[in-house]
Amino acid sequence: MNEELHYIVKRAAKGLMSRREFMGRATALGVSAVMANALLASAARAEGPVKGGVLRAGMAGGESTNSLDPALAASEVPFMVNMTWGEMLVDVTAKGELDMRLAEEVSSNADATEWKFKIRKGVEYHNGKTVTAEDVIATLKRHTDEKSQSGALGIVQGISEMSAEGDMVTLKLASGNADLPFLMGDYHLIIQPDGGVANPAEAIGAGPYKVVANEPGVRHTFERHANYWDSSIAHADQVEILVINDNTARTAALQAGQVHMINRVDPKIVELLKGVPGVSVEAVAGRGHYVFIMHCDKAPFDNKNMRMALKLAINREEMVEKILGGLGTVGNDFPINAAYPLFDDAIPQRTYDPAKAAEHYKASGHDGSPIVLRTAPGAFPGAVEAAQLFQQSAAAAGIPLEVKVEPDDGYWSDVWNVQPFCASYWGGRPVQDQMYSTAYLSTADWNDTKFKNEEFDALLLKARAELDATARKEEYSKMANILRDEGGLILPMFNDFVEAKRAEVGGWEADPNGELMNGRALVKCWLTA
Amino acid sequence: MHPILRLVVQRIALGLLLLLAVSVLIYAGTEALPGDVAQAILGQSATPEALANLRESLGLNQPGYVRYFNWLGGVLTGDFGKALTNGQDIGQAIAQRLGNTLFLAACAAAISVPLAVILGLVAARYNGRWPDKVISGITLSTISLPEFVAAYFVIYLLTQVIPIFQPVAMVFPGMSFWAKLQAVALPVIVLVLVVLAHMMRMTRAAILNVMQSAYIETAELKGLSPMRVIWKHALPNAIAPIISVVVLNLAYLVVGVVVVEVVFSYNALGQYLVDHVAKRDLPVVQAVGLIFAAVYISLNILADVISIVANPRLRHPK
């Protein structure tokens, strides 16, 4: 390797040169892009994690009303805070595999109705106590309590019996669920001493960092848990989350080096930010999606032809291009994409077809009165513009949409789940079963399309207990087709997580499970300079 | 009783009455918001039993006036209760954030008030000539900028083009005074830009108004320099209107700077109030509302008192 190339590879690996700059110079030295990438990756590996320093994230999605109680986490900052101080039984890797954390081993019986988790020995909480199987049971009990208000309530409801024996936790389910271990990776289910019943917001966990300062809506600071069991992560001495809800200030803080990484980069400024030295934009294809939901049980959406007409009257490519700035992929009216295991890519892509939409619209026998679509700036970024685009593409098919812009305040209590047709978003779930169970099962708490289909429900329950992957994939495919053709969900696009980081951040990895490496960016990354 | 003292006591008593009336309005207003507090806390997954339990524990079954007096009693003894959303003690949270609010307001006032008065005097001195036009032009254009535009401009200029400040202006207990000053530099600059024109224009107008008087003419005829005439003879007599506009702007610096707080992520009361309004966390909304009202009323009393004291006719009763 020539000397200059060697030099710039080292600099780039140390984070002293941005990736963009490196690629530019390497190309100038006659190295192919593929080769340059490989060089950089191997050099970065050789460089290895660096210990020490204070790693900071600037994040949108925090309020002064936030609590440290893991059960109550609902927005991005509390999620990230949980993932920094807390540890669950398992985690889900970027590839969608189980990452064993407090559980060392997991096994099930043949019909997936009984699961055993072997708890790792000698893991310490921040207060010096040791993690026990009883703590796990107590934690799960707290989240299954109807009064707990836990965000994981729907997940743990299926557990009918739990017991602890030595270091073994046994969970029995009312009906089989092959995905149960994945559900235990839900970010609410942080294992706490005695289940954290006395004071869940004390934030005593077994995670890599312990909470030092907790100022909701302002900042959260942490220091490394000295006795953390896994030495392969938690590199920085201290980590910090600054809550910066304003887009401009967040971006400026990253550029000024006040923070090392930010979430939710506005798609409109991605191109500008890419040109800033020392900063790189990371767009990660995930499972989150922006949707328009129709209530299948209310007129005029109780008419299948009307639902189909609207699904055909939306221009998905245009949405991805204009609303997401190209940072996303088109949806197909069911909430699953290639980021999920067992996704069936053979299902045909629905496209904009005004002629066919007009046919269905006529067949629906609608009286021609305006169909009201409610939206709000906060329904998802660009939701108002998306509704207007939808209005235009539908008008071309002769469907009279009327866009009604609602205030953000009260949108989730007064419009979503109440009005028959509105804009919304979903963050996605680690596995298909969980996504469908949360929002499309007839009895689901959050069945926001009021979709009730016996065949679909039966397939879901069958697939849940199915341990054979091929058979499951087939069942999921059938379900996707049913939802796509019958459901009240219009899913034009899956949005990427658009984030940005500084060049001195090492160990970054794209993770489709959630924003900022599924909330573990502060735990898994390190500072190279 | 000395007439000034009597007027001051009257004003303070009136202020307290007004505050009491405001407390009733705040309480009634927040209670009248659509939706039940218990329902708002428990959200859509609430079961009827949980709702009943919570209503009981929050005392929602009692009549409104009983709850109002309980609340008022708590407030008078310094107990604002706990936030519904995260159980934090409201009094503590407010104390810290009010401190930050006042720090920001004090920094902005310490720069803007003397600057505005001096600029106003200079503008009055050179009335209609180029210094007056330059000063008026610049301050009028900064006040015409919406705050967030001014803020973004300042962020761009002073963190990106000339990187001397940090865009995020959070302050924490334990930070040195110097570090705090550095942290709030950008919001202070924006606030100064926003409030300067109003105070400057009022100073200028008040001085010019007094300058029409006969005694100013006398002073001029005595051969005093124009600046001395303004400083010694015009300013003391123009103080009342100037004070009232200064105080109005001080009140704004305390209760009206939410936009600036949001843009710079400054952890003060405005942001705290907005977050809790969004979550229907009524005890916090009531507490912050009352504090804002108290600040506004006290500052207005202060303005009244200063104007009274500055009034020679009251200072020398017959």
Image (tube, coloured by chain):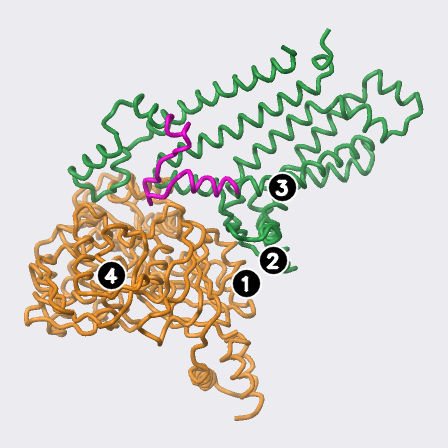
Chain colours: A orange, B green
Q: Which residue does the numbered mark 4 point to in the structure image? A: A191
The stretch of residues the image draws in magenta is B72-99
The secondary structure type at the circle numbered 3 is: helix
- Please tell me the numbered disc located at residue B108: 3
Mark 4 or 3: the one toward you: 4
Q: Can you tell which of label 1 and label 4 is closer to the viewer?
A: 4
Q: Position of residue A102 (x, y in %)?
A: 24, 69
**Residue placed furthest toward the top:** B318
Horizontal side of residue B307 vs B210, given as left or right:
left
Q: Chain of mark 2?
A: B
Q: Secondary structure at mark 1?
A: helix
Asked if labels 1 and 2 touch by Cβ distance under 8 angstroms, the answer is yes
Mark 4 element type: loop
Q: CA distance from mark 2 to mark 4?
A: 42 Å
Cα–Cα gap, marks 3 and 2: 20 Å
Which label lies toward us, 2 or 4? 4
Which residue corresponds to mark 1? Answer: A255
User: Mark on residue B160?
Assistant: none
Does residue B192 sit above or below B26 in this rendering? below
Viewer-proximal residue among A202 and A36 = A202
Report if the CB atoms under discs 1 and 4 are less than 8 Å apart: no
Give amino acid for label 4: Ile
Q: Are marks 3 and 2 on the same chain?
A: yes
Residue indicated by mark 2: B159
Identity of the residue drawn at 40% across and 64% down: A327
